[in-house]
Image (cartoon, helix red, strand yellow):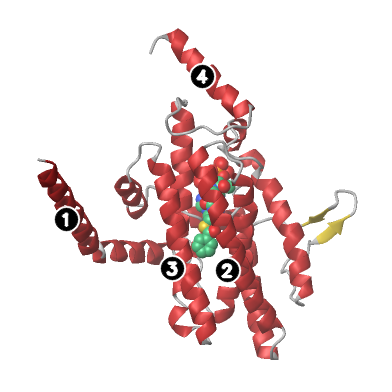
Amino acid sequence: MDHQSHSAEQARFEAIIAAEEKIEPRDWMPEKYRRNLVRQISQHAHSEVVGQLPEGNWITRAPTLRRKATLLAKVQDEAGHGLYLYSAAETLGVSREQMVDDLLDGRAKYASIFNYPTLSWADVGAIGWLVDGAAIVNQISLCRTSYGPYARAMVRICKEESFHQRQGYEIMRTLAAGSAAQKAMAQDALNRWWWPTLMMFGPHDAESAHSQQSMQWKIKRQSNDELRQKFVDQTVEQARHIGLEIPDPALRWNEERGHYDFGEIDWDEFQRVLNGNGPCNRQRIGDRRAAHEQGAWVREAMLAHAEKQRRRAAGRAA
Ligand code: BYC
């Protein structure tokens, strides 16, 4: 492409972004915009898929049939979210096989939160309430992302996440209103999941490698710190309502800012988890590798079936 038509394409791209319209797969886009989206969307997809593991751990031990059916449906939804997101990333010219290989070989990241263990039934409540709650805050904002297929996937995902958040909060509310042992179990889960949930929003804005460019391209619409603050403000009230205590002695309402002040995240722990040394990193990737290997026959059967259909159609056309 000559220089002039390249800058005309660039100007058109920038005009679409400025007009709050969507960039679609057929549109010209800067290579860095494409690569940044593939990075974020594929990491997001991996998070949904790996995110099934901590909760899946409790499907066989859910306390009632109703809880089991609800948890099964939730975990299945997460698999669906992974599929929408892999499909959105595929529109950018990367194959699903490549993305999955990158995850299984440790080249691609997924949300740090899923490297923590689920030790009690209350952890299922804490994940729904806090982890899905944090995911919604982030994803509502991403419904306005500039890339069409990503934005549309987010709309559907947010509807489902909102049900997930409520089922988690309901588990926590029930436990918090139960026996002393049940309330202690809920408080213990909140104590363990609170800080890792705040880490989900990523590093502080000043430390965030991609934020500035992503905000300029409207891939991200609100910064990591803005979204984290929004989550804290809404969740403190929810904890209070069910009589649980957020494990942060520095937490207090700041009248001047109109927001809660809160303590500093342990960024060393965040880095340890990102570098593969969290409590469950090896277990999670090991489980995904095993699932991938055990599912090989399903993929082969599906491909063989598709090939048979193709041959049949070609035979009919001849
Ligand atoms: N964990 O420059 P930054 C769910 C990485 S699942 C791991 O701020 P960016 C659910 C970051 O990737 C929903 N890595 O990055 C499922 C980057 O690394 P690379 C999950 C993190 O992209 C099942 C580096 O640190 N939601 O709801 O501008 C059951 C520098 O960061 C994390 C999403 O995936 C982290 N927490 O902003 C229940 C949301 N934070 O790529 C529930 C979509 C940062 O340079 N993603 N990193 O190697 C985003 O919104 C953004 O990617 C982030 C980070 C806000 C996460």
Q: Which mark is residue 304?
A: 1
Q: Amino acid at mark 3?
A: Leu
Residue shown at the point (40%, 39%) measured from the top left: 91
Can you see residue 73? yes
Q: Amino acid at mark 4?
A: Gln
Q: Amino acid at mark 2?
A: Ile
Front residue of this view, candidates 192 and 178: 178
Can you see residue 51? no
Against 126, residue 270 (above or below) is above
Is the CB of the residue bearing disc 2 within 8 angstroms of ligand 1? yes
Where does label 3 land, which residue? 53
- Marks 4 and 3, Cα distance to the nearest angstrom? 42 Å
- Sequence-wise, the earlier of marks 2 and 3 is 3
Specify few, some or many for label 4: CA neighbours under 10 Å numbering under 14, 14-19, or 20 or more.
some
Q: Amino acid at mark 1?
A: Ala
Residue shown at the point (50%, 75%) measured from the top left: 71
Q: Which mark is residue 127?
A: 2
